Amino acid sequence: MLTIEQEIYDAIVAHARRDHPDEACGVVAGPEGSDRPERFIPMVNAAGSPTFYEFDSTELLALYKDMDARDEEPVVVYHSHTATEAYPSRTDIGLASEPNAHYVLVSTREHGNSEGPVEFRSYRIIDGVVTEEEVTITPTQKTQEASTP
């Protein structure tokens, strides 16, 4: 099951709408081993395509170095489908290289970059096997700043 805060859900959906008609893609990082998606990182679709996404290799390398320095890992890898349902394509399945990640797909096929419902689904993809999982959206937790006297 993927548990994700409303603010991150909203950010993923907004990115998918903003990039429509091209596919959007990105990562939500979290502390290593925690399964907590905490840091939203929108990426550039280097393919610039309505039917395919590709992370820019330089941007992806920088992201992995940054996550490593922060003791983070990709908890969610997301992208959008602009004309089809939110289900992984054969290409998506072949690109899935993070066995611990939740693969989120957002379909903007119905409303494009306009307001309206989207299809938001999450999967585990391990060794080519796709398993859909439940998504629970929780209220955003605001961190309390410690006050000084």
Image (cartoon, rainbow, N blue to C red):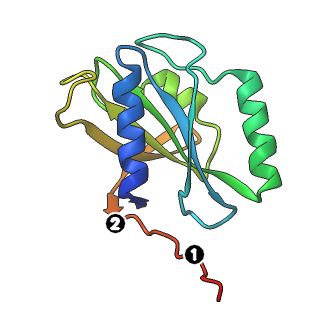
Instruction: Say few, some or many: other residues with alpha carbon within 10 Å of mark 2 (under 14 / 14 to 19 / 20 or more).
Output: few
Residue drawn 70% across and 62% down? 32
Spot the residue most to the bottom: 149
Quick check: 121 above or below 45?
A: below
For residue 125, side relative to residue 87 (left or right): right
For residue 126, side relative to residue 80 (left or right): right
In the image, which is nearer the foreground, mark 1 or mark 2? 1
Type of amino acid under label 1: Glu
Residue drawn 42% across and 32% down? 15
User: Percent from the top left, x then y, of residue 59?
Assistant: 72, 27
User: Percent from the top left, x then y, of residue 129?
Assistant: 49, 41
Residue drawn 41% across and 43% down? 11
Residue 88 visible? The answer is no
What residue did someone put label 1 on?
Answer: 145
What residue did someone put label 2 on?
Answer: 139
User: Percent from the top left, x then y, of residue 98?
Assistant: 64, 44
Q: Nearer the viewer, residue 100 or 8?
A: 8
Mark 1–mark 2 CB contact (< 8 Å): no
Q: Quadrant of the C terminus?
A: bottom right
Query: Image quadrant of residue 63?
Result: top right
Residue 86 visible? The answer is yes
Type of amino acid under label 2: Pro
